[in-house]
Image: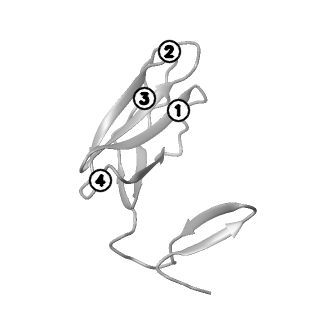
Amino acid sequence: MFISKHTFLVALGALALVAPVGAASADGPLASVSEKLGGAPVGVGRCVKTSVAMAGATVAMAVVVTPGDGVDPGDEFVVRGYVFTPDQVIVKVCNVSQDTATPEATVYNIRLLR
């Protein structure tokens, strides 16, 4: 079996990238936390967003965003993140419901995958 920095596992047709336990490397994920988003009404099809400075971020990186306080913004909302420019990540909470709704206020964990 070939083992490199990362081990690829295939299970039930899904491919997962697993970093070795305890390994710290220059090609690991970058992480940060946003300011709180939410707590105020958001119109149908509208978003609230924030910008987060993350040194080393590039537009080629994948962004994973999760609620940081364990607070789900609500089923009416979709949370997404993307690298807008080098070193700058945008986090958006968008209302996908049929009515104006208020997302729970929370910070968001951000991870960039190289």
Which tag is nearer the camera, tag 1 or tag 4?
A: 4
In the structure shown, which secondary structural element does the residue marked by tag 3 occupy?
loop
Q: Answer with left or right where residue 26 lies relative to residue 100.
A: left
| Image position of 108 with respect to 94: above or below | below
- Whole-percent x and y of residue 44? 50, 15
Q: Quadrant of residue 35?
A: top left
In terms of sequence position, does the residue under pointer 3 or pointer 2 come before the other?
3
- 3D distance between C-alphas at marks 3 and 2: 14 Å
Residue at the disc numbered 1: 78
Residue at the disc numbered 3: 38
Q: Please rate how many residues cluster around mark 4, counting C-alpha atoms within 10 Å: few if below 14, some from 14 to 19, many from 20.
A: some
Q: Please rate how many residues cluster around mark 2, counting C-alpha atoms within 10 Å: few if below 14, some from 14 to 19, many from 20.
A: some
| Image position of 78 with respect to 23: above or below | above
- 3D distance between C-alphas at marks 3 and 1: 12 Å
Which tag is nearer the camera, tag 3 or tag 2?
A: 2
In the structure shown, which secondary structural element does the residue marked by tag 2 occupy?
loop
Residue at the disc numbered 4: 58
Residue at the disc numbered 2: 44
In the picture, the quarter occupied by the N terminus is bottom right
What residue appears at the point 49 percent right and 30 percent down from the top-left corner?
A: 104
- Residue sitting nearer the eye, 102 or 48: 48
Q: Answer with left or right where residue 98 lies relative to residue 93.
A: right
In the picture, the quarter occupied by the C terminus is bottom left
- Residue sitting nearer the eye, 108 or 2: 2
